[in-house]
Image (cartoon, rainbow, N blue to C red):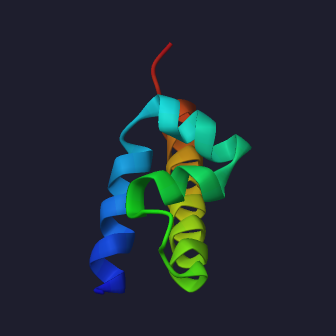
Amino acid sequence: MDFKAEIEKAVAAITGDKAKVKAFKKDPVSVVKSIVGNDAARELIDKIIEAVKTKLGAGGFLNKIKGLFKKK
């Protein structure tokens, strides 16, 4: 199993769908398992959760910065 490919696929699937982002915030393990399968190694699930959290955190931070510079 290619961990990097699975992580990238899951991150793209979750961050690209507002409903999945909302569900991920409530129950990240279930959302990740629904994408990569229930038999995925716990190590992979944990890495995906961390990657998604990083991506969401960076996106939220960047959006806040962009908001500071918008014309009103």
Left or right of residue 20, residue 49 in this image: right
All told, the count of numbered labels is: 0
Residue sitting at 50 percent across and 64 percent down? 38
Compared to residue 50, the image places residue 11 above or below, namely above
Question: Is 14 placed above or below 11 here?
Answer: above
Q: Which quadrant does the N terminus fall into?
A: bottom left
Q: Quadrant of residue 54?
A: bottom right
What residue sits 43% from the left and 62% below the top? Answer: 37
Where is residue 16 shown, x and y percent of the image? 36, 41
Front residue (pair 38, 45): 38
Q: As drawn, is 29 to the left or to the right of 55?
A: right
Left or right side of 51 for 4: left
> Does residue 41 appear to the left or right of 28 in the view shown?
left
Instruction: Give how far across and how far down residue 24 sits, in percent.
Output: 60, 46
Residue 58 versus residue 24 in the image, above or below: below
Residue at 60% from the left image edge and 60% from the top image edge: 53
Say which of 36 and 48 sits in front: 36
Give x and y (percent) for residue 27: 69, 48
Residue at (61, 52) in percent of width and height: 30
Name of the residue lying farthest toward the right: 26
In the displayed structure, would residue 40 be above or below residue 55? below
Front one among 4 and 66: 4
Q: Quadrant of residue 28?
A: bottom right
Quick one: which residue is furthest to the front in this view?
39
Q: Position of residue 4 (x, y in %)?
A: 33, 82
